[in-house]
Image (tube, helix red, strand yellow):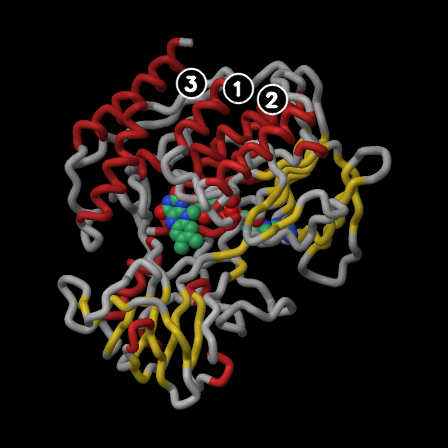
């Protein structure tokens, strides 16, 4: 079906109770939403952005890091992890900001598809930034190297322009909102013997196009959305692709439906000096490349909280509702840590919440109550046998979480159509991993979404 073309709605500025000087680190989708909502609430905002443009992960580049595994801490960091063919894994009506629908545009060379390519997301973020005049708040090519709290309670932010030989600059802020993203620092699978294995290894952070895999025998580790896309893409040029994952327990050789050169394997047991890879249950092959599609680590190299906030087995904590460290709240906050979600609408709500708390319009529980809440949450994960690294995995409860924040903010809860489309897309992605971006059965919900967008606009025009 074709998506109707709609324009956007606007919220009016808030009346501030107290205005703060706030530093936002990063101008990806989360940082843009932070800037938008902080300013709407009446705060003064400076956004520090290391790159020369907004967009974060959505700024595609052919460039990759010199270390294809991203293990060298001194390497020049390439922020983006996008591959050339990437299309969104969420439909645009679910993915977009609540306040600014991600509707197809008639103008220019835009990609009107329901699951557009990465360039279209970048264009959408540019539109969002321009609509709300966010760029004027951003200091581009300015990297934050250290953030710490002074005795006075103010936060000191040290930054430096990336070009030229400019000096470090220290500035004081009332609050810092961390929006530096978490898809840049590779997580690597531990493979016994891999140090002596003679083949090549690469993390999906440095995957761009399938060509380097032509005629190769590839072992790909992982089953994430990117792993699914990349394995299919590589299969078109590689001799063999072996997908290794904990969830494949087959003892026999099973090929991926529709492919005669892609096998589903159990996890790797070892990599061997003779160039072979041994899988559980005894299967062994000779391979050229291991491609780690094994996700990313939270990484805050600039943040010095004197040990109050730590990253432990990929749990960033302690954090009240994934946002505030209780003893530093509300002056330090994190936007965008949860995963297995629709990120942009959640960023908006987290940012609205942070902005309202900083101005005193919304209140937080006491430090003790927040700490107890965090401890109860961690206890519940532990009782469920959940490793710490799943702390920010919101499978199954993102909308409950979003609605809780919305209630705190006095904002509308998540639209029913958004929840239902998200759910329908998850099912469709499982049922049609090859073509869920082209075939779907939730047209009625899409229609509701666009009717809702149109209603918001007419309300705005009347008010
Ligand atoms: C391969 C892949 C596919 C994805 N597909 C989808 C999808 O289809 N739909 C969807 O909704 N989401 C998708 N996502 C999730 C995506 O990451 C989020 O949608 C979102 O864009 C993340 O925004 P962010 O602002 O949190 O982080 P980022 O976009 O990573 O932005 C962080 C910004 O912080 C800056 N920064 C970092 N450190 C510093 C520093 N020290 N000083 C100054 N600036 C700094 C960076 O330069 C960057 O601009 C995908 C992610 C990946 C990796």
Q: Which residue is label 1 attached to?
A: 409
The picture quadrant where one finds residue 355 is top right
Q: Nearer the viewer, residue 276 or 455?
A: 276
Query: Mark 1–mark 2 contact, CB under 8 Å?
Result: yes
Question: Which residue is situated farthest in the top direction here?
Answer: 463
Question: What SS does tag 1 mark?
Answer: helix
Query: Mark 1–mark 3 contact, CB under 8 Å?
Result: no
Measured along the vertical axis of the image, is residue 162 above or below residue 155? Answer: below
Query: Within 10 Å of the Cα at label 3, are there few (<14), some (14-19), or many (20+) other Cα atoms?
Result: few
Q: CA distance from mark 3 to mark 2?
A: 15 Å
The structure residue drawn at horizontal position 72% and vertical position 31%, both measured from the top left corner, is 21
Query: Mark 3–mark 2 contact, CB under 8 Å?
Result: no
The structure residue drawn at horizontal position 73% and vertical position 47%, both measured from the top left corner, is 307
The picture quadrant where one finds residue 24 is top right
Question: What SS does tag 3 mark?
Answer: loop
Q: Which residue is label 3 attached to?
A: 412
Q: Which residue is label 2 attached to?
A: 356
In the image: residue 87, left or right of residue 399: left
């Amino acid at each position: 079906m074709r998506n109707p073309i709609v324009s956007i709605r606007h919220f009016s500025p808030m009346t501030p109770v107290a205005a703060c000087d706030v530093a936002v680190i990063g101008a990806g989708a989360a940082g843009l939403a932070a800037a938008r909502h902080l300013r709407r609430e009446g705060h003064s905002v400076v956004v520090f952005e290391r790159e020369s443009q907004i967009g974060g992960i959505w700024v595609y580049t052919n460039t990759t890091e010199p270390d294809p595994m991203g293990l060298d801490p001194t390497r020049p960091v390439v922020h983006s992890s996008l591959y050339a063919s990437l299309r969104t894994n969420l439909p645009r009506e679910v993915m977009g900001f609540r306040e600014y629908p991600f509707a197809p545009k008639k103008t220019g060379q835009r990609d009107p598809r329901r699951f557009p390519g990465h360039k279209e997301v970048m264009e959408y973020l540019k539109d969002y930034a321009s609509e709300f005049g966010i760029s004027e708040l951003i200091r581009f090519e300015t990297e934050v190297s250290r953030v710490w709290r002074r005795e006075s309670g103010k936060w000191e932010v040290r930054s430096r322009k990336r070009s030229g030989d400019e000096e470090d600059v220290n500035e004081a802020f009332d609050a810092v909102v961390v929006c530096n993203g978490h898809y840049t620092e590779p997580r690597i699978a531990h493979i016994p013997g891999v140090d002596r294995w003679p083949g090549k290894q690469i993390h999906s952070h440095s995957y761009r196009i399938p060509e380097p895999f032509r005629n190769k025998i590839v072992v790909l580790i992982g089953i994430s959305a990117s792993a699914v896309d990349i394995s299919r893409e590589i299969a078109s040029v590689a001799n063999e692709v072996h997908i290794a994952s904990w969830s494949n327990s087959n003892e026999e050789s099973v090929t991926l439906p529709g492919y005669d050169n892609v096998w589903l394997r159990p996890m790797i047991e070892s990599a061997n000096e003779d160039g072979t890879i041994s899988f559980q249950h005894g299967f062994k092959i000779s391979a050229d490349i291991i491609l780690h599609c094994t996700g990313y680590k939270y990484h805050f190299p600039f943040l010095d909280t004197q040990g109050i906030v730590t990253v432990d087995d990929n749990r960033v904590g302690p954090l009240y509702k994934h946002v505030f460290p209780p003893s530093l709240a509300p002056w330090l906050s994190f936007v965008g840590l949860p995963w297995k979600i629709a990120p942009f609408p959640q960023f908006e709500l987290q940012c609205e919440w942070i902005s309202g708390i900083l101005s005193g319009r919304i209140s937080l529980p006491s430090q003790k109550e927040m700490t107890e809440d965090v401890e109860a949450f961690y206890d519940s994960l532990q009782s469920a046998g959940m490793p710490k690294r799943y702390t920010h995995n919101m499978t199954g409860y993102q909308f409950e979480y979003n609605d809780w924040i919305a209630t705190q903010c006095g904002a509308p809860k998540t639209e029913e159509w958004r929840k239902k489309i998200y759910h329908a897309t998850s099912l469709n992605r499982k049922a049609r991993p090859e073509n869920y971006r082209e075939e779907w059965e939730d047209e009625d919900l899409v229609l509701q979404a666009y009717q809702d967008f149109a209603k918001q606009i007419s309300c705005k025009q009347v008010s």
